[in-house]
Image (tube, grey):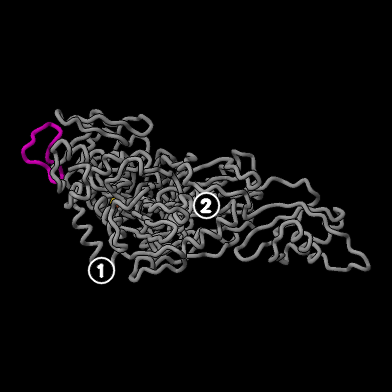
Amino acid sequence: MQKFNISFLPDKKKVFITEEVNLLQAAAEAGILVKGSCGGDGTCGRCKVIIKEGNYTTKQTGKLTKEQLAGGYVLACQTTAESDLVVEVPEASRLSEHQVLLEEETVGEAVSQTSVDPLFKKIKVELPEPSLTDSMDDIERLKMAVRKETGIENLRVSLNTVSNIPGILRKEKWKVTVSLADVLGYTEIAAVESGWDYQKYYGLAIDIGTTTIVVNLVDLESGQTIAQKGSYNQQAVYGDDIISRIVHATEEKNGMEDLRNAVLKSLNELISQLASENHIDINVINYAVCAGNTTMVHLFLGIDPKYIRLEPYTPAINIPEPIRAEEVGLQICKTAWVYCIPGIASYVGGDITSGAQVIGIDKTEKVTLFIDVGTNGEMVLGNQDWLMACACSAGPAFEGGGIKCGMRAMRGAIERLDVISDTLDVEYSTVGGAKPVGVCGSGLIDCIAGMHKAGIIDRTGQFSSNLTNQRIRNGDDGPEYVIVSKENSGNGQDIALSEVDIKNLIRSKGAVFAGIRTMLRKMDLPIEIIEEIIIAGGFGRHISIKDAISIGLLPDAEFEKYKYIGNSSVKGAKMVLLSKTARDEAVQLATKMTYLELSIGNDFMDEYVSALFIPHTDMTLFPSLS
Ligand code: FES
C-alpha cells in the first residue's frame, strides 16, 4: 500500500498516511478538527478543504458550487491522495472554539445543597502503639483507627499500599494521614502519608457531552470549584450525533479506538490545562465523576455501543462500577477512581440522571418537567411520587445540524433575531458581537416565530406565494428568506433560511412537544398539570420562551413556571463528587425513573403528526396564542 505526505495549511502540520485514508481522517490525525456533521457520508458538505498541490481522487462533489470546484475545493471525507498533497483548511471548515457553558448558575431553591462528604478525602489518625500485650497487625490497627475517626465499617487496602504502611507508621510514630476513596460498597484506604501536614487534594466533575466537554477542578476539602474548562468533544469529526458516532464505532476499522482516543484526548488536554494553569500536579487529582449520555459513557469506557441503536435498544450497561483512572486512560493520579453517573436507558443517560438530581425532581411535590434539548431531546416528568423519562429523536437541528445556515452557538452565530413585520427586515445580535456567519438554535426559533408572525410562512412552514420582498427569493432548495446578505455577513456568504430548513426545524420541535404530550398521555394528565418547567443545556441559555411557545416547541405555560438551569450535567457530577449521599441517591434516582420507549405503539406518532404545525393542530393547547 502506498503512503503519502499530507501538509496542512496554514497550520504547517504534516502527516504520513496510506492511500486509503481520506483527508478528513488525515486532518484528525494531524490534530486539525474539521467539521464533519454527517460523519464522512459526503452529505453535509461541511468538510470543505482546498487542494493546493498534488494529485487526488474524490468521490462526491455534489455539495460544492461551480466556483468552489474551480477554486480547488473538495470534500475532505470524500478525497484520498494519489501523491503527496498540500491542503488548505479554511477557517469556515474548522471546529472553532465553542461557547461552552461554564458559568455556575443555580435554580435557586430547586438546587439541593449537600454538605461536603467527598468520595475521596484525607483524614489524620493516631494509632495506639503495638506492644507485647497488644500485637494486632498493622493493617487491622490502622483500620480500627480509621473506623474510630470516621465510623466507616467496610474498609479495604490494596496489596500495593500494604507494603509501605508498616515503615511509615513506625517512622511517623503512629501519627499519619490516611487517604480514603469511596468505591461503591466499600471504602479503600488508598494511601498512607507521613505525618499530618498533607498535600491538598482535588477531584474532577466532568460533563461528557456529544458536542462539548466540560471539566470542573474541585478542591475536595472545601468543595469549591477552583477552575473550569470546556471544549469540543473531538469525536465531532466523526459525526454530529450519537447515531453517526455509533456507526463509526461499529462499522469502521479501528472505529471504537478512534472515538475513545478522541474523547480521551479532549479530556486529557483540558485536565492538563487546568492543572498547569492552577499549578497543580495531576497526581493530586484523586477522583473523577463523569456524567454523559449512554453512548458517550460507553465510548469513554471502551464498551461497544452497537446494541444501543438496534431494536430493542438495550445498552451494555446503565450503572457502571467505578474504574481506575489508569485503566480508563484518564491522566490524573493513576490509582484514582473514575465514576460514571448511572443512566436510565439507551437514550436517557447519566447526564439526565445528573440534571434530575440537581433540580431535586424526586423530592418535590410540584409536577416538574425537565428538558434537555441537545443533539437529542431528553426529558423527565414527575415529582416525588412518580417519574417518567423519555428521549425523542429531535435531531441536531437546534444545534445547527441539517440546517444550511445553522451552526452551534459559536462566535458569529446569530443568537437573537427579530423579523420586522412591516418591512420584513431583520434585527439581530450575535455571539461575541462578531459579524454574522450563521444562526444557532435560539436564533432559529426566533426566526421561525418571526417569519410566521410576519406572514412569510404559513402554519405548515410553507412560504406564502403572495409576498414579494427582496429578502424572499428562490434558492437551490426552493424558496428562502435572506436573513443577512453576503455583503454584511462575516463569511462573504448569504445567510438564508429555506423552506427545507424550516420543515426540518418543525420536525424537531414537533418531536420535542410530542415527547412531552406522550408522557402526559401515559399518565392521563393534562398539560396544565405541569407546575415547573426546567430547561437545561447550552441550547436553553438564550432562547426566548415566548418564541419557543409560539412555534409550539414548549408548552403554553406562564413564563414564571420556566427556569433555566445551565449545565445541569456537570453540576450533578460535582454534587456526587462531594457527597456519598448524593452518589447513593443518584443510583436510586436512575433506577426509580420509568423509561418510556416512544417507538412502542402509536401514541408518539399521533402526537408528532399533530405537532407538525406552527404551533400545533390543536390550538386549545396554546390558549395564549388564540
Ligand atoms: Fe464530509 Fe459531511 S460531507 S463530513
What's under tag 1, amino acid-wise? Gly
List the residue tagged with mark 2: 573
Give percent across and percent down for residue 466. 5, 38
Residue 255 shown left or right of residue 45 in the figure: right
Q: With respect to residue 52, does 330 lie above or below?
A: below
* Mark 2 / mark 1, whichever is N-terminal: 2
The residue closer to the viewer here, 398 or 211, is 398
Q: Which residues are magenta?
A: 462-478
What's under tag 2, amino acid-wise? Ala
Task: Say if residue 286 shows up in the picture.
Answer: yes
Give percent across and percent down for residue 474. 12, 40
Pick the quarter of the image with the C terminus. top left
Image marks 2 and 1: residues in contact by CB distance under 8 Å: no
Q: With respect to residue 279, does 618 lie above or below?
A: below
Please tell me whether mark 2 sits on a helix, a strand or a loop: helix
* Few, some or many residues within 10 Å of mark 1 (<14, 14–19, 20+): few
Q: With respect to residue 437, does 533 lie above or below?
A: below
Q: CA distance from mark 2 to mark 1?
A: 35 Å
Tell me the residue at 47%/41% (across/down): 108
Tell me the residue at 34%/51% (across/down): 530
List the residue tagged with mark 1: 601
The residue closer to the viewer here, 320 or 608, is 608
Q: Nearer the viewer, mark 2 or mark 1?
A: 1
Residue 429 shown left or right of residue 299 in the figure: left
Membership of 49 in magenta stretch: no
